[in-house]
């Protein structure tokens, strides 16, 4: 492949921002240097419920370098108090020092500002806060009797029902009724949340690590009662988010409030331990799945009932059962979601929220059903293949799941599997093979972009999106290179600033579909303008020719021997040429059900004597529409699968019930996969064209990679050992 062809859509172009990142040129939010910058640290509550009786700020105010101790007593009274819902159903009720109430352990109770980060942190730790603790709701088992139905759910209604699942259950010869659980998990991006807040009169600049610059601007405007036009949010690079930076949390507002008081720019960088505090997490889920099948393995009834927890501040529901509504063909399906409110921080979107946790339950239950039927797990899934979306009652815009099963099985060697558990060995180790279906919906929101050709011959691309490490800079460069047939060196991408054309949250795996479509349309608009300008220009060799006589090639317009250079066209005109676009979804989501699909296969090796479990191999085969970049796209799926290994084997945040504190709130005790845990991962793509989802034909790939992985690993563990573990993570203690 020629180097420049790598820059086209689908090419394996390396990350556009790779060099800047590895050489330290890429500035992350906490790294901006502003004159007079001072440093803030959060003090957080040590009880889970109650009131603040007293805070002795005087001793701390005398500590070296301390400029401000901001508490509920001296904090600005905000018009919205903590209520900053700008993106329902995430209501985002923040804890921003508006009263003396404590709702969870780890809640901000004060912000200390000092000359250095060390001074701020020392002072925050020294702050003496007296509480009047109250009985806290912390014991999920005890509180479950108070479970309630949330008003709404990301991805649909909390409860759904079609057909008559109970009647079908009664007459079914084969039934599975099992309960699965997933623990609290924390996002733990490499870069913790960080904000620099700088006021200039009544204007506020925020350098914030976020997945949504426009969301931060709007949330802050609402919370502080400000004109959004007076707030600028900048985020050039984000060191990972996994969903926790998709909403704005309390610390951003607290940084702005502190900066207003001290009249200096304030940096508030969240400590790793505080990443387990007021910034969201994946909630605990308990999921009962009932599957009933006939003698041929056809599903007669499906129920998926989800019980999960939220905070006392806000109803946020992990939508685990949404995937069950559409994944398999079945006439009788019921799903429900119930919430238990506890005195903990509010949970949030994390790595395929609902799909990752829900496919663990559903795809494990399918494996249990296959074992009961003595049927191959792929065969069971093929017999229940949904040719259309039975919940929405819509055709799929495209679906290549059968091909994913076939390709994945072939690459993995599935046909050599001995179905009998405990039948495969490698020396003293048991070997197990398991599989699961992967799926994630294809979303899209309106987005805007501007593409400008200047006299220097460089094309400047602008959109107020952001790159949370997924490759947005890179694919936008490729899309423009493709549309204008230019080398990537001639394309500069500017994102991460609300002064650029508005773009949606980088969440829900939709940035490529949303922003990519806008950038492509803007580039094509620019191309048309360049041609028109040349043809109308008496100084152009192409003057007066009809549009269709002109060929666009490598930065030149050509017609026979006549040529005009695009940069020369701009120079003669004396002003840049600009293409602009707003790209929005049409009615396709009402006409089609749109999803990416995949199949994931796992091999585990188990040493029973040592209770040691290793995932030795994973194969994932995916159909994701147009793959915009073969290299970064593969990396996205690799990363998702690694997240799936973490979910399957390690990740679990433990809540201490008397105190309400997360006890393993650090990266030594909260385990994520390291290189030794990640062995061979094979990614394959099923070619798929889908012109219905969006102009690029790209389905989202940010999150599908994690879906199905925990189930495939758990199913492999069952195949290896004959032992079914229904609670994540699959730790050695549960093996013995
Ligand atoms: Mo992702 S959990 O949709 O930011």
Image: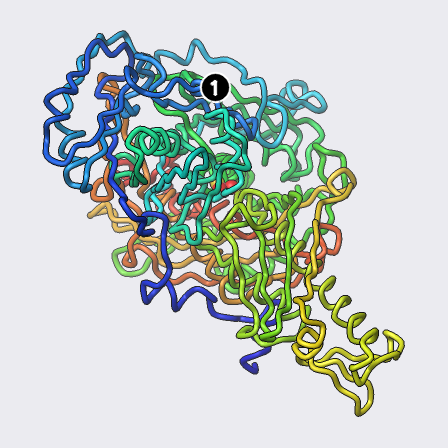
For disc 1, the neighbor class at 10 Å (few under 14, some 14 to 19, many from 20) is some
Residue 352 vs residue 399, the one in the foreground:
352
Q: Is residue 208 above or below residue 619?
A: above
Q: Residue at x 44, y 54 (%)?
A: 469
**Front position in the image: 551 or 537:** 537
Label 1 lies in ligand 1 vicinity (Cβ under 8 Å): no
Residue 361 percent across, percent down from the top left:
48, 34
Tell me the element at label 1: loop
Whole-percent x, y for residue 543 in the image? 84, 80
Name the residue located 79 percent from the left edge and 89 percent from the top edge: 562
Number of dots carrying numbers? 1
- Report the residue at 40% width, 25% height from top: 346
| Viewer can see residue 184 | no
Q: Position of residue 624 (x, y in %)?
A: 61, 55
The residue to which callout 1 is attached is 80
Question: Which of the 4 quarters of the picture holds residue 304?
Answer: top right
- Pick the front one: 56 or 314: 56
Query: Residue 696 appears at what percent x and percent y?
Result: 68, 58
Q: Give the color scheme: rainbow, by chain, secondary structure or one colour.
A: rainbow
Q: Residue at 70% of width from left, 32% of height from top?
A: 391
Q: Quadrant of the C terminus?
A: top left
Q: Quadrant of the N terminus?
A: bottom right
Task: Answer yes or no: is residue 545 visible.
Answer: yes
Left or right, 351 with respect to 688, comes to left
């Amino acid at each position: 492949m020629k180097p420049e062809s790598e820059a086209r859509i689908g090419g394996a172009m390396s990350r556009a921002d790779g060099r800047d990142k590895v050489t330290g040129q890429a500035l992350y939010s906490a790294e901006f240097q502003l004159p007079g910058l001072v440093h803030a640290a959060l003090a957080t509550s040590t009880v889970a419920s109650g009131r603040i009786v007293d805070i002795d700020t005087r001793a701390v105010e005398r500590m070296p370098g301390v400029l401000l101790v901001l508490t509920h007593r001296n904090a600005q009274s905000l018009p919205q108090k903590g209520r900053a819902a700008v993106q329902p159903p995430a209501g985002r009720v923040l804890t921003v020092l508006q009263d003396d109430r404590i709702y969870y352990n780890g809640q901000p109770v004060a912000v200390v500002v000092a000359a250095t980060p060390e001074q701020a942190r020392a002072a925050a730790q020294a702050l003496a806060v007296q509480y009047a603790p109250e009985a806290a709701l912390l014991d999920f088992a005890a509180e479950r009797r108070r479970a309630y139905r949330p008003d709404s759910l990301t991805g649909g209604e909390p409860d759904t029902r079609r057909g008559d699942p109970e009647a079908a259950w009664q007459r079914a010869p084969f039934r599975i009724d099992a309960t699965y659980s997933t623990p609290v998990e924390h996002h733990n991006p490499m870069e913790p949340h960080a904000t620099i807040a700088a006021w200039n009169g009544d204007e506020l600049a925020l350098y914030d690590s976020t997945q949504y610059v426009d969301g931060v601007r709007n949330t802050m405007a609402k919370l502080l009662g400000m004109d959004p036009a007076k707030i600028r949010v900048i985020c050039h690079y984000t060191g990972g988010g996994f969903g926790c930076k998709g909403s704005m949390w309390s610390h951003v507002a607290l940084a702005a409030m502190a900066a207003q008081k001290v009249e200096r720019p304030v940096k508030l960088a969240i400590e790793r331990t505080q990443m387990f505090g007021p910034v969201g997490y994946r909630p605990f889920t308990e999921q009962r799945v009932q599957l009933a099948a006939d003698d041929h393995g056809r599903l007669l009834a499906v129920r998926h009932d989800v019980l999960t927890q939220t905070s006392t501040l806000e109803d946020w529901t992990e939508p685990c059962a949404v995937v069950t509504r559409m994944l398999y063909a079945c006439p009788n399906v019921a799903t429900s979601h119930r919430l238990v409110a506890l005195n903990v921080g509010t949970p949030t979107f994390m790595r395929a929220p609902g799909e990752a946790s829900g496919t663990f339950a559903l795809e494990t239950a399918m494996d249990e059903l296959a074992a009961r039927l003595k049927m191959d797990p792929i065969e069971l899934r093929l017999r229940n293949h949904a040719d259309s979306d039975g919940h929405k009652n819509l055709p799929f815009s495209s679906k290549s799941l059968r091909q994913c099963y076939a390709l994945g099985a072939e690459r993995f060697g599935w046909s050599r599997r001995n179905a009998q558990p405990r039948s495969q060995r490698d020396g003293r180790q048991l070997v197990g093979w398991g599989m699961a279906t992967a799926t994630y919906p294809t979303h899209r929101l309106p987005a805007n972009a501007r593409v400008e050709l200047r006299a220097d011959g460089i094309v400047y691309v602008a959109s107020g999106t952001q790159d949370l490490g997924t490759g947005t800079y890179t694919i936008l460069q490729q899309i423009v290179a493709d549309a204008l047939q230019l080398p990537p060196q001639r394309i500069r991408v500017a994102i991460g600033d609300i002064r650029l054309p508005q773009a949606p949250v980088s969440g829900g795996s939709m940035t490529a579909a949303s922003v990519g479509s806008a950038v492509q349309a803007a580039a094509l608009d620019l191309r048309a303008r360049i041609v028109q300008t040349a043809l109308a220009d008496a100084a152009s060799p192409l003057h007066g020719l009809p549009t269709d006589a002109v060929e666009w090639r490598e930065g030149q317009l050509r017609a026979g021997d006549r040529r005009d250079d695009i940069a020369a066209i701009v120079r003669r005109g004396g002003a840049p040429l600009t293409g602009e676009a707003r790209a929005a979804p049409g009615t396709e989501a009402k006409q089609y059900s749109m999803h990416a699909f995949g199949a994931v296969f796992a091999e585990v090796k188990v040493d029973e004597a040592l209770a040691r479990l290793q995932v030795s191999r994973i194969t994932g085969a995916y159909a994701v529409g147009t793959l915009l970049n073969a290299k970064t796209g593969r990396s996205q799926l690799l990363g998702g699968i690694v997240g799936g290994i973490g979910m399957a084997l390690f990740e679990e945040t433990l809540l201490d019930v008397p105190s309400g504190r997360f006890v393993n709130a650090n990266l030594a005790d909260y385990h994520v996969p390291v290189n030794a845990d990640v062995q061979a991962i094979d990614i394959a793509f099923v070619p798929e064209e889908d012109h219905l989802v969006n102009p690029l034909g790209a389905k989202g790939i940010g999150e599908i990679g994690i879906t199905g992985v925990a189930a495939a690993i758990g199913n492999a563990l069952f195949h290896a050992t004959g032992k079914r573990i229904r609670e994540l993570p699959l730790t050695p203690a549960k093996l013995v």
